[in-house]
Image: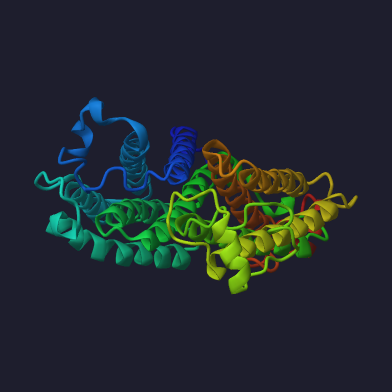
Amino acid sequence: MSQPSHSQSLPRYAWFVAVATLCLIGLGGMVTSKEAGMAVPDWPTSYGYNMFALPFSYWIGGIFFEHSHRLLGAFVGLLTTILAAWIWGRETEGRVKWIGWLLIMVLVAMLGHRGSASSDGGPANVPAHLKVLAGIMPILTLFGVVQCLQTKGSVRWLALTAFFAVIFQGLLGGFRVALFAEEIGVFHAALAQAFLTLICFIALRSSRWWQDLREDDWHEGFASFRGLFAFLTVLIFAQLILGAVMRHQHAGLAVPDFPLAYGAAWPDTSPTALAAINARRTDTFYDEPITPFLIHLHMAHRVGAFLIFTLAAVMAWQALNPRRKYSFLSKFALTWFGMIALQALLGATTVWTKKAADIATLHVVLGAGCLVVGSLVTVVAARVCPETLQFELPATASPATVTERHASPEATTV
């Protein structure tokens, strides 16, 4: 069957959305690194102005980073809306198509209405319809996820779920400001990573490369390898969430030395030791003292990084096995290990440079990249190794079947 004329333009556009999302995550990391999360204290307005009409005279210091993050977030939302409408229109027909488009238009109209101007901030000044959206979008996002699972990754439901998620993400960012709630920032950061991965998966699924990927790409002896991919990807996502908690708890320098911790393998958190630590602190931007919780949170992040690096090294060693070293999955494994090693170095450098904003931001961006690579390779492995991880492949596909096909080109399967 011939490919549609837009078969190349759609994945290219989806990858563009993914790049824009990665830039948004980087800018969000810069906002956190610059301690600019509340530089614009009201939402959905910005110092009482419509967000898109804030005078350039305001764009200074932390306001520049926070407001730029809001504008780029709106741009990514627009790009995602176009992507969802495009795919939904391509993959559906009749009444279902128009219902989906109508839902998209209604939600965009609700989100686009910013309400009356107010510079006071706080939840009382958030328009009622945005509060309604805040209650609806988690449900719609979860509904989309369920549909994706039931349809085994239908592209149209992936796209619509991404549309729901990007609205939910914007609302989380807004209510983090309106409620002055640091903990919402953690969910905001976690959803950003999941959203980026979803957009990249949509780009992969809509590509010709994915359509041409068949069980013939199965590689003997790869069963344990792909399991390690999946497990390591889950660990990386958990590590990214832990890092978000650490950033929003301002625990990045709770232990200011590396590889030791206050000169020891594990820091002393006794009252006497903590009193001495807080007495000689030089980072006093936040008046809150260093506590055992902050130290243990920081150390948990280090332990997670060590575990991920170790497993990635094991994976890279397995990739050098002669049976595997020429497969694309092995090449991905070695590339992934290089990214994880660089990520570990950036984490150490973040401590050594006392949380330099550019280094800390690169650490966030590369972490997102590591998650994306792991997630995409995991689903690719599930597709080309169908005997245990079914993913839109015929139920009859198996290594034995593949071997028979290779041995007998004339063989056919009904």
Q: Is residue 48 above or below residue 316?
A: above
Q: Position of residue 294 (x, y in %)?
A: 54, 64
**60 or 95: nearer the viewer:** 60
Quadrant housing the C terminus = bottom right
Q: Is residue 263 above or below residue 368?
A: below
Report whether residue 325 is seen: yes
Q: Position of 180 compared to 254: left or right? A: left
Q: Position of residue 348 (x, y in %)?
A: 67, 47
- Residue at horizontal 66%, vertical 46%? 343
**227 or 124: nearer the viewer:** 124
Quadrant of res 95: bottom left
- Residue at horizontal 39%, vertical 63%? 183
Q: Residue furthest bottom?
A: 270
Q: Is residue 376 above or below residue 226?
A: above
Q: Position of 151 compared to 242: left or right? A: left
Looking at the image, how many numbered discs can be counted on the residues? 0
